[in-house]
Structure formats: structure tokens, C-alpha cells
Amino acid sequence: MKRVRIAMYLRLSKEDDKIKTESNSISMQRLLIEDYVQKNFTDYELQEYVDDGFSGTNLNRPGMFRLLGEAGEGKIDCIIVKDFSRFARDYIELGDYLEQIFPFLGIRFISINDQYDSNAYRGSIADIDMHFKNLLYDLYSKDLSQKVRTALAARKAKGQYVSAHTPFGYQKDPEDRHMLIIKEDEARIVAKIFDLAFQGKTKNQIAQKLNEEGVKTPIEFKIEMGETTRAPKGDGFQWSSSTIASILKNEIYVGDIVYGKTEKKQIGGKNVLKPRSEWKIYRNHHEAIVSRERFGAIQKKHGKTVIRRDVPPKSVLQGLAVCAKCKKSLLYKGEYNPYFTCPTRYCVKESECLKKINVMYLEQAVLFELGQHLTEQGLISGFATQQKQDKADELRRIKKVIDTQKRQYKIMEKSNYNNYQSYLSGTSLEFISLAKELAEKSEEIRKLEEKASMLEETVRTLEKGSNAHGGIHVELKRELLDRYIENIMVKDEDYFEIRWKEQGKNLHSLDIEM
């Protein structure tokens, strides 16, 4: 009997954390699901997907993204959750997955507390109870979100400071938690940063000076106060140009608080930046650290703030490639001849951090060493078998989708013909043409068939086994890198070190001379 590949999905939102319900904690969800699996399955493989601190009002969560991606790739046979609300609180979206997507992918879905098992209940009267519960979850989530937004809006309208965290240089007034007061030791550093900027120092120069003088960073102050716990990546915490920039552009330091910069179009959606004319600014809310005149002059010197957008990595090595000196993740720069550099290099005088290394050169070197590692560790055989199986499975799934799409096309084509006949016979006053929909469906099928053709060629190549590493073509994909590589410590253009891992553990380090 085939081993069942089970995915347990665990989620805890910020609202759950505030309520402090122990049954909703990640650890309790894990124990509940593990106990259920042990009692109801014999031969299984259990994988965990976690989203800690994410709302259930939409599916835009890292753990969920990974879960659905691997489900689409055919790597999951069964998904188990504590209850429906852990997976999603939008009952329409959840219904689509339970009734259409998961059945199409052949995935079994189990919600323990709701006593729902898709193998037993799909298409039965029990689904009515499930839909009703989902509707209640959805309405509860929307009602709670609306109440929270209304309460915050009322406080903001009064000019109260409502953020849970205080900016560097300030603390909350013990007698009024909606008021800020100056924190002297931090405020002196803030004032110094503005003084240096006013003198014409760049952000990198300011960061470098603070690092040379051993000035504590904002995170170090928070650690001393017991507000957070964090270990530095390298030898210690360092001031960076981005930290300096965030301080220099913050209007909180002239005594103002700004609300309403963004708006959310829908519950669980993304925040969208509004025009500055629509922001709500409460002037002279608290004591200023820097004068308005100096603040304004510095904004003109440093130019307009560039709003950063979330963009996908431009190299599969981003996040894995780190500076051998300070252990910070390397920064991707350049467009036509991209290279990696250490972001803290110019913030520390006489730094030994990486200056520059060509991205394509590093990728090719890592690709070669990855193939060598798979061969040396005796992993190439299993990897080859798994790669051929994955590609073959993907090809079968695409062919199923193509068959489904072609059936839908024929139905639409027949419906379009019937509409035309009804119009000709006079039973219908208007010809409802499906020509546009048919064209779109035809294009969709064409693209799927192209993808299937490419996969067939890949499968044939893998079957022949013609490549440079023991009969397998190794592709530099992030999933593969994450499986075998802990990180890549880059010292300079001539030397780097790959730290390998197996089953989540670092086995050894391999020095590579290039």
C-alpha cells in the first residue's frame, strides 16, 4: 500500500495570541494533529507547514503558499487542520478548495474539531453543516476586523498614539499610554544623527561613524529593556544606512504623528499608499527632538524617499549567500552585469566585508559543487530517480488538465452553436456569442500543450541520462538549494565556503578554491 504523504497545517494569528487561548497555540495544534495521525494512519510521512502571527482572512501566508505549491506539484496526499478557521475564514474561498481544487488534485482534507473528512462527507448532507460553520467564521472575522478598525480610528481621530511600539528616542508616558515622552539616552543618539546629516554627512558615513564610536543600535536598547530577544548574525549589531534613513525621514522627531498613510481595500488585503494630501497629521503632539527647520533642510538634502516594493529574488542564491566576515545576507546589485556585495561594507571603516562578486559566476560555481556533492554523498541515484518521478508526475497532471480543458471547450462550443441556432430560429432575440471565451480557452490549451511537450522532452532526456553528474541534469532551483545547502559564506572573488546540510542538520563545511 502506498505511503500517505500528510501535511499538517498550523496557524496562529495575532488576534489568537491576544486572546491567549492555549488550545489555539501552535504547540497544541501540533499535538492534536500528531495524535490524530497516529491513531488513524499506519504508513505515513508527516510534513509540517506553519504560519505564526498571520490572519486567516486570506491565503497570502508563507506557510500556506508553500503548502499549496507542493499540493499543486502532487507532493501531498492529505491535509489535516485543527479546524476550518486555521485554514481559512473566507467560506467562499475555503469552499472552492474543498469542493473543486483538492478533489481535482486528489487530496484528502481533514478538519479534526469539525469532524470533517472529505473521504466520508464530500457530496453528502453533512456539507451543509460545514458551509454554515465556514460562514460563521467568515462573518466573525469580518465583524472583529471592523470593530478593531473602528476603535483604532476613533483613537486616531483624537490624536492619540496607538501603536504598540515606540520609535527610537521615545517611550510611552507611564501616566498616559497614548502619549510619547523623550527617552534621554536614545534621544541623544537621534539628535546626533540629525546633526551629522545637517553637516552634510551621507547615511553611510553616519552609520560608519556610529559603528566606530561603538554607539548602541536601537535593537540593543530593546534587548536591554527586555522588549525583544535576538542574536546578531555576525560579530555584533551594526548601524546601517537603512536604519539611518528610517530615522532621518520620520516626522515623529519633529513632534508630529502621522496616520492614514495607507488604506486596505478589503479585509485581509494589502495596504495601499494614499496621496500625501490625504494623510492625517497631528502636529505638536509630543516634544520634538529636532527642529522643523533642520528636519526640512535635511529632507531637501537627502531627496525624496524611494518607496520599496516587495519584489521576487533576482538570484536563487539571495538569502543563502552571506558575507563571510559579518554574516549578513549579500545584497544583489546591478542590472546588466549583476553582482553581490555586502550591505554593511561602507558602514564600517576598513571593512573586510565582501566588495563584489559576479552573480552568474557564483551561481555556476555553486551549481558545479552541488552536482559534485550529490555524487560524493551517494545522493545522485536517489535524486535522479526522484527528479524523473517528479517530472513524470507533473506531465501526467498537465495532461489531465488538458483533457479537462478540452472537454470544457467542446461544451462551450456546443453552447455557442445552440445560442446561434436559437437566434436564427427566432426563439432568442439576441445572439450571445462565446467567441471571446472560446478563443481564450483555446489559447490556454495551446500553452498547456506547449508545456506538456517541453516536459515530455525533459522526461526523455532524463531517461537517457545524458549529463555531467552521474546521469542527472542538476538545475539550480531554490527548492533544491534549500534542501542541501545551509548557506554560502563568501569571502572575496577567489574564495567561498559552502555549508551543507542533511535532514535540517549541518554536516560539514567544504572549502572551495575558485
Image (cartoon, helix red, strand yellow):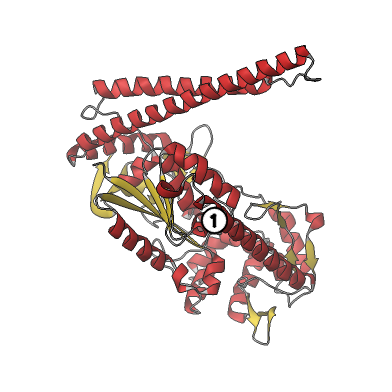
Q: Nearer the viewer, residue 12 or 6?
A: 6
Q: Is residue 55 above or below residue 166?
A: above
The residue drawn where x is 44% and y is 45% is 318
Residue 64 position in % (x across, y down) = 48, 50
Asked which secondary structure carries label 1, the reply is helix
Q: Which residue is mark 1?
A: 129
Number of marks:
1
Q: Nearer the viewer, residue 216 or 220?
A: 220
Position of the C terminus, as image quadrant, is: top left
The residue drawn where x is 71% and y is 56% is 262
Q: Is residue 17 above or below residue 394?
A: below
In this rendering, position of residue 420 left or right of residue 75:
right
The image quadrant of residue 18 is bottom right
Residue 204 position in % (x across, y down) = 56, 56
Residue 427 position in % (x across, y down) = 78, 18
Q: Residue furthest top?
A: 424
Q: Is residue 352 visible?
A: no
Residue 52 position in % (x across, y down) = 47, 61
Position of the N terminus, as image quadrant, is: top left
Mark 1 Cα shell of 10 Å, populated few (<14), some (14-19), many (≥20): few
Q: Nearer the viewer, residue 345 or 92?
A: 92
Q: Is residue 460 above or below residue 324?
A: above
In this rendering, position of residue 467 left or right of residue 152:
left
The residue drawn where x is 35% and y is 23% is 458
Q: Is residue 405 above or below residue 24?
A: above
Amino acid under label 1? Asp
Q: Nearer the viewer, residue 188 or 90?
A: 90
Q: Residue furthest bottom?
A: 175
Q: Is residue 31 visible?
A: yes
